[in-house]
Structure formats: structure tokens, C-alpha cells
């Protein structure tokens, strides 16, 4: 944040030179706003600076941004601070300015920009012919991956983007203006590491008037005569991650056992001892009411189950899926059913070989290349579980380094599926959901081992999900 803000300030100083000028920093409550706070601090040595925080200071989301706001609060002689949602006050500030810094929203924005932020963006854009507008990292409202506009976006004269050029900035000159990529000291390797940024990209902010169902309805299709625990672990992990409602569709032989795991679980008893083609109609109906679906945990490989899974995948349309365990093995002969879908496939090395007929190499670079190649060929997101989890959508790659040897215990993969499904329900972004899920699952496992040593169960990992998530909940 310090490096980013300093780079913004240095660029603005190059534009304005030594002339007297007034700068308005329009900041949001996230890290993008924090970059703006730092820039304001540096620029106050040379220019008049106003900072308009479009939020209550108590709602600044990250510690680093809060610390930089606190510094500004002590600079009463050189920086004028404004906060809240008074658009008329902002309009007056903008009218008197020479340069506007857009630090409202960064890469974590999801959904259309709503009021009062839409009016704030409109006020900034109304100044575009008379004032210089500089966007921090991306113009607020522009999707950094796709270039789509979240309802409305700032139209900047310059965009100072950090570390590397983001795909969504290409061919969007009407919003980005001139683009400058600046180095803020991030090692190239960090670009490929799963981490907090992926979590922030998929976590859904909780509004005061949220209602049941707003944070995801998850369906878990799993269980068989021999396996009852796996689907329950996926469902409990989804609930601990923050899903509102989780339904497990399970064969009659284990439905009552699964129901006994927790009163928070909704269990739909299917017709036979194992998943059967007769159950596909009810699965499709349940799927239509769900925001994300996990299929595979504990299903088994009975002939009737294989037939039912193939039939289900041949009929399901436009749904977000996490495909795990036995469902992966069943799909190995029917990959055409899952290609080009919003799905996350979560194989370990053995399942990867069954699915794609290739051994997973031990060398990390070779492993990354293989996963990227296979994801590209099938146009899906693959999360290869292992000592380092590897995620790819065929273009991008993330490597996750959280997790530990204690997580070799059976069931932690089922936990991962439940976390991934919740993130997918919130964001509809398979790549970042898979990356964030790998990071949070491993972090929860690390917290469990820190407390208990290498004597953990999947339930211990589930219990630590809220602690792993706490820093990133909005």
C-alpha cells in the first residue's frame, strides 16, 4: 500500500509540476482507498489536498487502510478530511479541484455499483472535460479480468495499475485513458500465489438487511450405502464458510445417518440404497433451486450410480458445480459433459490420472504446466490437490502453499469442496473461488494443527474455517 500510494503521488506530481493545484482523493473503504490515503499524504507536501472517504471511518475494511486513515487524521494542518455520503459536498470539492484521484473501488468489486456510489461516480465523470482524473489500479466500476462495467465506471484520463497489466484494461480506453504499469515491489512469484486477494475477490459483503438465502443455497449430492461422512463434511464446511442453506441429496441407506450429524443440515432422502437414475428428476429440481452444487463425496462406484451421474450431467444446464471424488472417476469417460462449464474439478494426483490419463509429475513447474494445459484443452477450472495445490483455468495459474501433513486425514478434500461451493455461489467466479477455497482450507488446517498437533480430524478443520475467514469477512 505504501509503495502503491507513493507511485500514484509521484505520477500526479509529474503531471502538475510546481504549479499551485488542488487535489481531491475520492476513496472507498477498501485497500484501493488505502492507496489513496497514502498518495494524499505524499501529495500534501506540494499541493492542497482534500480526501473524501465515501464511508464511515469505522467501516474501513482492512487494518492497513485504517492505519493510513489514522495518519491522515493527525495531519490537520495539511489535509482536509471529509467522510460519509454527502454527494453535494463532494460536488463542491470536485468543482474546486485541478486533479481527482479515483480510489473508490479496486479489483474486489462485485455486482453493479449502487447508490450512493453510483452518484459519486457520476459526479467524477461530470468533471472529465475540465479536470484531470487519475484512477488507482483500475477505474472504479471496471472489471479487471473481463473489462465489463459494473453498471457504471469512472472515465479516467490516466490509470496507474500495479505490478502487471490486467486483462480487463485492454481495449477499454474510454474508461482507462492512458495506462501506466508501475512496479510496487511485488515479486513475480507472488502473482501466482493463492492468498487473501482471492478470498477478497469472492467474499460477499453482508448488508444490514440481508435475508435468508442471500448468501447461498448449496446442494450436495453424495453418499452411498458404504459412505455417509463425506457429504456431511462438505455440507458442514459450506455452512461454516457462510452459506445460508445446505441441502444434502443422499440415498435412502444413509440419509437418516447424515441427518444426525447436525440439525443445521437439510437432507433429502432419495429412493434407493445408492444413487439411481430414478433420482435424477428430483436432483434436477433441487439443482434449479441451488446457487452451487457439490457432486461426488461418498457416491461410490456402483453401476446404477455411474448411470445416474452420467444422466444428471447430460441434463443439467447453466449451473455452477464443484465436481469431486467419485463423480470425477465417473466423468473420466464422459469429459464432454463438463467441458466449457462453470465448474471446478478437484482431483488429487490419482484422480487426475484417471480423469485425463496422465501421471502428475513431481516437479512443480512441470505440474503447473500440465494442469494449465489440461484446463485449457477442456475449458474448465482444475484444482489439483497436493502438497501445493494448483489451480488453473487454462490461462491463469495459482499455487496454494497453505496446509500441512496433518491434512492427509480422510475428509479434508470434502471440506475443500464445501468451501469452494460457497465461494462459487457468492461470486460465480470458478477460478478465484477455487484459489480462495484452497487457501482457506489449508489455513484452517494450519490453525487446527497449531492447536492440536498432527492429530486432527476433518471436523477440526471445519471448526477453524470461521477463524480462517474472519479477517476477510465484510
Image (cartoon, rainbow, N blue to C red):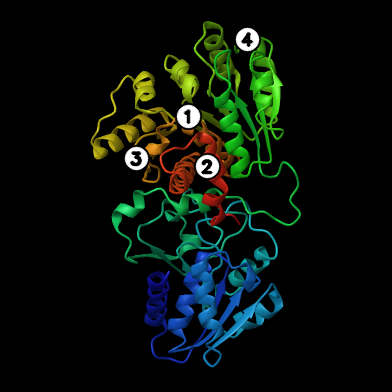
Rendered view: 472 above or below 40: above
The residue located at (65%, 65%) in the rendering is 117
For discs 1 and 2, the disc positioned in front in the rendered view: 2
Judged from the image, the secondary structure of the residue bearing numbered disc 1 is loop
Work out which quarter of the rendered image holds the C terminus and state it: bottom right
| Along the viewing direction, whichever of 35 and 193 lies nearer the viewer | 193
- Decide if residue 41 is in sight here: yes
The residue located at (56%, 67%) in the rendering is 104
For discs 3 and 2, the disc positioned in front in the rendered view: 3
The Cα atoms of the two marked residues, 2 and 4, are separated by 35 Å
Q: Position of residue 293 (x, y in %)?
A: 59, 30
Rendered view: 326 above or below 232: above
Left or right: 455 with respect to 284? left
The Cα atoms of the two marked residues, 3 and 4, are separated by 37 Å
Say which residue label 1 marks: 340
Sequence-first tag of 2 and 4: 4
| Along the viewing direction, whichever of 350 and 27 lies nearer the viewer | 350
The image's mark for residue 388 is 3
- Decide if residue 318 is in sight here: no
Sequence-first tag of 3 and 2: 3
The image's mark for residue 429 is 2
The Cα atoms of the two marked residues, 3 and 1, are separated by 25 Å
The image's mark for residue 106 is none
Amino acid at each position: 500500500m505504501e509503495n502503491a500510494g507513493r507511485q500514484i503521488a509521484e505520477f500526479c506530481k509529474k503531471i502538475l509540476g510546481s504549479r499551485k493545484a488542488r487535489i481531491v482523493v475520492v476513496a472507498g473503504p477498501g485497500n484501493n482507498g488505502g492507496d489513496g490515503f497514502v498518495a494524499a499524504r505524499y501529495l500534501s507536501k506540494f499541493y492542497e489536498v482534500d480526501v473524501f472517504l465515501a464511508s464511515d471511518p469505522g467501516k474501513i475494511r482492512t487494518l492497513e487502510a485504517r492505519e493510513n486513515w489514522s495518519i491522515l487524521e493527525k495531519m490537520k494542518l495539511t489535509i482536509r478530511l471529509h467522510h460519509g455520503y454527502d454527494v453535494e459536498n463532494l460536488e463542491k470539492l470536485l468543482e474546486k479541484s485541478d486533479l481527482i484521484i479515483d480510489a473508490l473501488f479496486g479489483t474486489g468489486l462485485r455486482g453493479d455499483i449502487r447508490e450512493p456510489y453510483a452518484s459519486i461516480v457520476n459526479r467524477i465523470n461530470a468533471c472529465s472535460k475540465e479536470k484531470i482524473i487519475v484512477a488507482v489500479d483500475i477505474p472504479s466500476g471496471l472489471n479487471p479480468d473481463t473489462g465489463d462495467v459494473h453498471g457504471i465506471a469512472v472515465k479516467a484520463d490516466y490509470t496507474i495499475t500495479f505490478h502487471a497489466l490486467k486483462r480487463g484494461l485492454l481495449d477499454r480506453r474510454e474508461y482507462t485513458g492512458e495506462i501506466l504499469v508501475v512496479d510496487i515491489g511485488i515479486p513475480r512469484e507472488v502473482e501466482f500465489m493463492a492468498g487473501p486477494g482471492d478470498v477478497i475477490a469472492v467474499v460477499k459483503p453482508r448488508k444490514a438487511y440481508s435475508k435468508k438465502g442471500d448468501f447461498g443455497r448449496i446442494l450436495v449430492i453424495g453418499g452411498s450405502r458404504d459412505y455417509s461422512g463425506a457429504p456431511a463434511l462438505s455440507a458442514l464446511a459450506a455452512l461454516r464458510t457462510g452459506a445460508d442453506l445446505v441441502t444434502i441429496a443422499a440415498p435412502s441407506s444413509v440419509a437418516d445417518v447424515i441427518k444426525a450429524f447436525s440439525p443445521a443440515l437439510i437432507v433429502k432422502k432419495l429412493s434407493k440404497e445408492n444413487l439411481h437414475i430414478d433420482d435424477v428428476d428430483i436432483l434436477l429440481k433441487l439443482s434449479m433451486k441451488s446457487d452451487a452444487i457439490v457432486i461426488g463425496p461418498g457416491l461410490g462406484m456402483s453401476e446404477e450410480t455411474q448411470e445416474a451421474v452420467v444422466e444428471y450431467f447430460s441434463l443439467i444446464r447453466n449451473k455452477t458445480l464443484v465436481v469431486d471424488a467419485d463423480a470425477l472417476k465417473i466423468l473420466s469417460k464422459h469429459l464432454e459433459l463438463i467441458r466449457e462449464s462453470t465448474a471446478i474439478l478437484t482431483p488429487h494426483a490419482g484422480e487426475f490420472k484417471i480423469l485425463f490419463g496422465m501421471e502428475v509429475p513431481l516437479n512443480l513447474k512441470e505440474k503447473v504446466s500440465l494442469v494449465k494445459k489440461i484446463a485449457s484443452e477442456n475449458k474448465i477450472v482444475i484444482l489439483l490437490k497436493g502438497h501445493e495445490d494448483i489451480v488453473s483455468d487454462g490461462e491463469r495459474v495459482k499455487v496454494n502453499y497453505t496446509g500441512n501433513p496433518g491434512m492427509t486425514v480422510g475428509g479434508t478434500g470434502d471440506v475443500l469442496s464445501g468451501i469452494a461451493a460457497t465461494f462459487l455461489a457468492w461470486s460465480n467466479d470458478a477460478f478465484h473461488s477455487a484459489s480462495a477455497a484452497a487457501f482457506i482450507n489449508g489455513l484452517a488446517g494450519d490453525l487446527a494443527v497449531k492447536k492440536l498437533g498432527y492429530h486432527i480430524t476433518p471436523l477440526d478443520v471445519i471448526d477453524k474455517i470461521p477463524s480462517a475467514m474472519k479477517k476477510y469477512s465484510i
